[in-house]
Structures are given as structure tokens and as C-alpha cells.
Image (tube, helix red, strand yellow):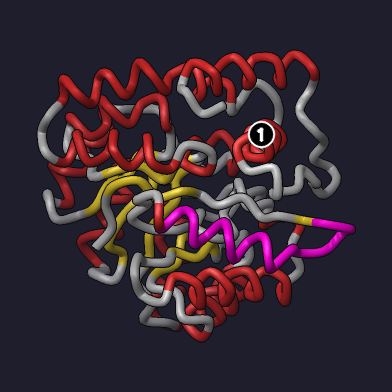
Amino acid sequence: MFSGSIPALVTPFRNGGFDEQVYRAFVEWQIDEGSTGLVPCGTTGENATLSFDEHFQVVRTCVDVAKGRVPVIAGAGSNDTRVAIQNIRAAKEAGADAALMVPPYYNRPNQDGIFAHFEAIVAACDLPIMLYNVPGRTVTDIQAATVVRLANAFPQIAAIKDATGDLARVSAHRDGAGSDFIQLSGNDDLALAFNAMGGRGCISVTANVAPRLCAEFQAACGAGDYAAALDYQDLLFDLHTAMFTDASPGPVKYALNRVRPDFPTDLRLPMTPASAASRATIDAALERAGLV
């Protein structure tokens, strides 16, 4: 269902609004370059600063351009279960193939609360769900036992984007939920090891900038050619690191503008542009990867 290189798409803004024309060209380019799925309105897409109407305009646009060629996994999470239900229903109505759902942030529920949150979402909408575990942002960790419990209780919960950085969880999830439960890395720099342990790909920040290289890297992993995959890892590692030399998505928007000058670097407050030091690091990484 989901595998390979799946960019967590940035959202282009111009003069304060969503630049739909640029986004359409960007999504088409991603598909042409070999991306195997698309995630609109995730963290990298600045979903926290999108209104409800803007959010699902972006999702609808992505779905319209993709036209079923690759799956669209719409960001739809919330710390309010009622809002999360509203969002996943809107994602389904917009034509998304699945929803990417974080556990409730800020509230900090316990593991039973996390389970009950997703239980209510599953009961309200039948769109496939990809869990998104990123405790560094949410301060809420879906512990491995809870991931297993959710996957076994609800077949609709078909996958996880794991951004914990804890590689041992790949094995823990496989042990409890089985090999059919889809695991995708949420960290570009760890994707090689993640795949070797049983992962099926990455929801990638770097793929915004280097979609073909990231797709070729994931294809090598999928074919079991880890020697070739290691070469790609070495080539891309500096770029993976550079994407987080300042608050994301400032660095990735700067890098993307260098690769695609039509793409605006505008961000919405409280996000600000990448610093001079960050830009210099990105410039060097882009040159090393042969992208400029």
C-alpha cells in the first residue's frame, strides 16, 4: 500500500496565501522524479498555520494532480479527538487515500487515552490510517505496546511513520503486529538502517529537494541492494543533516528554491527563514549531491 520515497510536501506561500499554481507543478515534478507517495499538510507542510479551508484546499489540489498515480496520505491529526474526526472525514471527502494522524499533542494523554483517541477515529471514518509517532514535537509517545495494540485491534490502522529515532521499535512492532504492518521511517538519516530492519520506506523531508535520488535510494533498499543504498546514503547524508540546521521548514524551502527557483521561500510566523549559517551548509550539501 505504502512504500518507497514519500515526500512530506512543503506548502508554497506567496503574498500570504497558498500558491496553488506552484504547488501543482511541484507535485507533478515529484511524481515525474519517482516519488511513490505524497504527504500534503504534514509538519513540513506547515499544517499548524493552515486554516481548515486552506488545509483541505491543499489536500484536494494534491489529489487532483496525483490522479491516482501515487497514494496521497493527508495530514489530519489533532489534539482534540472531535477535530481529528472532522479532519479525517474531510481528508476522505477530498479524495485522500489515507490519513496521517499524530497522537494528541499538548494534552499528554496516557497510553489508554491514546488508544481511545484512535478507537473513536476508527469508529467515525473508514479511511486507512497511518500513525505518526513524533514525540519530539508532540511530547506524546505512542509506545511500542500501544502501536501493537492499535494495529491488532483495528486493521484500518495499516501503517506508522516512526520519527522516534529508536530503531529497535521496528523489530518490536514487527514482533507484535506482524510483517504486514507497514513501517516507514520519519527520519531520512536513519532510513537505511530502518529499512534493513524491516521498514518499507521513508516519509522524507529531503525528497522535497532531491526526489529522484531519494527514490533511487529507496528502490535500492527495496531490491535488497544495500551496497548501492549505502552509496546513496553517503551522497545524501550531508543534505539530510542540512535540512535541520535551522527550524524546519526554513532550510528545506531555501534548498528547494535553489533547485526550483519558481518555488517561494515564504514561511508563516512563527517560522522564519533559514539563518546564514544554515544556508551555507545547505549550499555545500546541494553541491555535494550534484543538485546545483
Which quarter shows the C terminus? Answer: top right
Q: Is residue 6 magenta?
A: no
Q: Secondary structure under badge 1?
A: helix
Q: Main secondary structure of the magenta part?
A: helix
Q: Is residue 113 visible?
A: no
Q: Is residue 227 left or right of residue 255?
A: left
In the rendered image, residue 243, in percent from the top left (x then y), is placed at 58, 28
Name the residue located 70 percent from the left edge and 31 percent from the top edge: 247
Residue 237 vs 155, above or below: the answer is above
Q: Where is residue 141 shown, x and y percent of the image?
A: 47, 41
Tell me where residue 41 sits by quadrant. Answer: bottom right
| Residue hosting label 1 | 258
Q: Position of residue 225 (x, y in %)?
A: 12, 29
Range covered by the magenta-colored residues: 14-31
- In the picture, which quadrant includes the N terminus? bottom left
Question: As rendered, which of 264 and 189 lies closer to the eye?
Answer: 264
Among all residues in the image, which is located at the extreme right?
15
Nearer to me, 112 or 27:
27
The residue depicted at 39 percent of the width and 69 percent of the height is 98
- Above-or-below relation of 53 to 23: below
Residue 52 seen = yes
Label 1: few (<14), some (14–19) or many (≥20) C-alpha neighbours in 10 Å: some
Residue 218 placement (x, y as % from top left): 27, 39
Answer whether residue 28 is magenta in the image: yes
The residue drawn where x is 16% and y is 41% is 222
